[in-house]
Amino acid sequence: MAGVYDKKAEQYAQRRPKYPKEWFSMLASLTPEHKVAWDAGTGSGQAALGIAEHYDQVIATDVSAAQLEHAAPHPKVRYLHTPISTSEDEFVAMLGGDNSIDLIISATAVHWFDLPFFYSVVNRVLKKPHGIIAVWTYYYDIPILKNSMKMVSEAVLPYRDPRTFHAYEKYKKLPFPFESVGYGSEGSPMELDMGFEMTFDEFTESLKTVSSFVKAKEQGVELLSDDILKEMKREWGDSTGSRKLFYLTYMLVGKPKS
């Protein structure tokens, strides 16, 4: 993932949506202790900042040093660069050792991971039996842009990274070897709405941070063609005004299996 988002790190930090505070309150309510949380694949720290309101310390890791350079500072958040070469033992030590983490989150990132490696680390550092892991992704399903987003979906196909398969499948096929706590389970993620106000330009700029758009741009292809933008503006209406958009989100929450 590091190379995918390095060139768009600043735009990613500015344009990716912030997650609802209610989600973090809900997740925090599931752990009896609130000492340490780990945000895996933090990017520019959107989720780390949210969960920091509930835990004494948040360790936020990412393989992309460029992303971390644009992460917002917070007194409770410690950002760590974790290159792909980081071994399991090194990773566990960086996180505080075995049985040290109350809550693990991965926001729109786990599909990029080496899952067997990640889950092995998770099972070592997550406190037992009450530690919690939560992973989620969001999906651009915007009714007011029905036609133009269909055009976008067709345009991105040649540039989709195979690692994004689980995200496009809405995490319904994502391996998740943890015991359900009532908020989604393997094969059946919990569906949530994530709504916020965006202007037309803010929305199109957020689209350009998607991995397939970045990959196409590197090959000299602009996926938001004139035809797509024309249709998008028609469906949007007044392109100078903001719209309340709702992205569908798919979340899996679990604890270590007994």
Image (tube, rainbow, N blue to C red):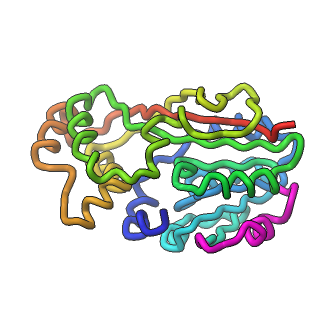
Q: Which residues are magenta?
A: 83-100
Quadrant where the C terminus is found in the figure: top right
Numbered marks: total: 0
Q: Is residue 48 above or below residue 5?
A: above
- Residue 90 in magenta stretch: yes
Q: Is residue 241 left or right of residue 104?
A: left
Q: Please provide percent x and percent y for residue 160.
A: 34, 50
Q: Is residue 210 left or right of residue 107?
A: left
Q: Is residue 191 above or below residue 50?
A: above
Along the line of sight, the residue nearer the viewer: 221 or 9: 221
Q: Please provide percent x and percent y for residue 107.
A: 57, 48
Q: Is residue 152 left or right of residue 231?
A: right
For image coordinates 71% across by 62% down, the residue present is 59
Q: Main secondary structure of the magenta part?
A: loop
Q: Please provide percent x and percent y for residue 187.
A: 59, 29
Q: Please provide percent x and percent y for residue 198.
A: 35, 42
Along the line of sight, the residue nearer the viewer: 138 or 45: 138
- Residue 89 in magenta stretch: yes
For image coordinates 63% across by 70% down, the residue present is 82
Q: Quadrant of residue 86?
A: bottom right
Q: Is residue 124 left or right of residue 71?
A: right
For image coordinates 85% across by 64% down, the residue present is 97
